[in-house]
Amino acid sequence: MRTILTVTLVISLLLTGCATSYQSSGFTGGYSETKLAPDVVRVVFHGNGYTRQERAQDLALLRAAELTLEAGCSYFVVISKNSDTKAQSFTTAGTSHTTGSAYVVGNKAYYSGQTTHYPGQTVTFYKPKTGILVQFLKEKPSEGFVFDAAFLVEELKKKYGIK
């Protein structure tokens, strides 16, 4: 039983041992998008317990920039954004360890022992989520804050070592 628990814990740690990579949404997080109009898309990035909020926001922007370029546009604006963090926790099983000694005198046996209990540990981790609603633009408007999609793709891929 202890071996099964150890193997399960090791596999879990290997699967979630690092920040969510830049990938389509899956077991360990990633991005997803929903097209809401020909030039409007909602991008959501879910991180795992090792992902910082900044990374989740950057990777949502990266996906929006890629979609902008795929749509044949050069710029995009963020219409709305939402970021939050979900707290999750689990408690490991506690253990007990007993030591003792027994001795026999005549036809009687005596035992002296001590049991030490080690309670389980509660581990809390935080999973960031960022959602942005963006509109694609073919030309840069004269006013307002606009993202240059090609520039953003280049910079964010360089920052996170994405090929």
Image (tube, helix red, strand yellow):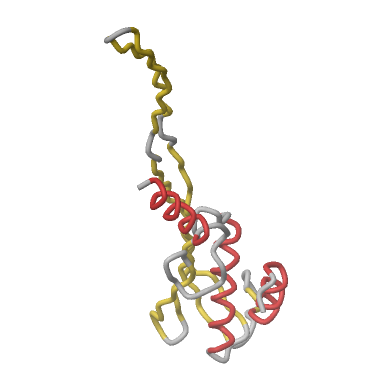
Task: Say if 121 sits above or below 162 in the image.
Answer: above
Q: Residue furthest left?
A: 107
Tell me if residue 131 can be seen: no
Residue 6: x, y in percent?
A: 44, 50
* 66 relative to 96 in the view: left or right: right
- Residue at the image position 47 percent from the left and 63 percent from the top: 46
Tell me if residue 154 can be seen: yes
Q: How many labels were placed on the picture?
A: 0
Residue 93: x, y in percent?
A: 37, 38
- Residue at the image position 47 percent from the left and 59 percent from the top: 11
Residue 105: x, y in percent?
A: 34, 8
Q: Name the image quarter holding residue 42.
A: bottom left
Task: Say if 85 sits above or below 58 in the image.
Answer: above
Q: Nearer the viewer, residue 153 or 5?
A: 5
Residue 73: x, y in percent?
A: 58, 88
Q: Residue furthest front?
A: 106
- Residue at the image position 67 percent from the left and 71 percent from the top: 156
Q: Nearer the viewer, residue 52 or 70?
A: 52
Task: Say if 44 sits above or below 120 in the image.
Answer: below
* 68 relative to 26 in the view: left or right: right
Task: Say if 47 sits above or below 105 in the image.
Answer: below
